[in-house]
Amino acid sequence: MKILAIDTSTAAASSAIVENGSLLCEFTINDGKKHSEKLINIVNIALENSGIDINDIDAFACSIGPGSFTGLRLGAAAVKGFGQALNKPVIAVPTLDALAYNVFPYSGLICPILDAQRNMVYSSLYTTKDNELRKLEDYRAIGIDELIEKLGEFNERIVMLGDAMPIFGEKLKKALPNVIESSPGTLYPRASSVALLAEKLYKEGKALRY
């Protein structure tokens, strides 16, 4: 099964193709340009470099937020258009789930944070159990000071990632000695994580048709 996924939830735009749990190709760009100017290009790059025709894709996936409203709308419209035109299923993946999956299977806690403006972040909390990513808390918008207070209740190591880390990372690490910042390559949502989670959702019967 081949899945083409895109992520346009943050300033970075990403496309990837996964086949039966293996990553064939991924392309990410964070050059400050509008997603509308580069979305089709990054999809074409993934297809061309993996040697796959778009007609051979079995399903399309995208992240559905939280994140940039404009970026998410463009990504959803593109994936829906592909699904309708080719009569293929579409799979929606929560952005925070995909972001946490960037560091799967980390053995401690995983806390993705996305910038929600005004000292707020979108966040949740995850762990790995039975070789699966498990969400421990509901998705939420929360003030950074309140998040620090909540995370202070945990003694184990917490790996943090997301586009809010360049804004709040130093504050978090100063307040919480158990916080670890993820590597730059995993900081932003990745289409490969969207695709791998989409494959799981597809097997669970959670794909959509338009």
Image (tube, rainbow, N blue to C red):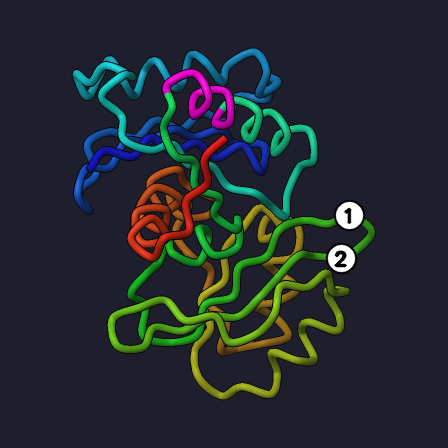
The residue indicated by pointer 1 is 117
Mark 1 to mark 2 CA distance (whole Å): 5 Å
At numbered mark 2, what does the secondary structure look like: helix, strand or loop?
strand
In percent of the image, x 77 and y 48: which residue is there? 117
Q: Amino acid at mark 1?
A: Gln
Question: Does residue 7 appear left or right of residue 101 in this picture?
Answer: right
In the figure, residue 56 lies in which quadrant? top left
Q: Which residues are magenta?
A: 79-86
- In the displayed structure, 50 sits above or below 128; it is above
Q: Amino acid at mark 2?
A: Met
In the figure, residue 100 lies in which quadrant? bottom left
In percent of the image, x 39 and y 37: which residue is there? 191
In percent of the image, x 75 and y 73: which residue is there? 146
Residue 147, label in figure: none
The image shows residue 171 at horizontal and vertical percentages of 66, 64
Q: Are marks 1 and 2 in contact (CB under 8 Å)?
A: yes
Residue 120, label in figure: 2
Is 81 a magenta residue? Answer: yes
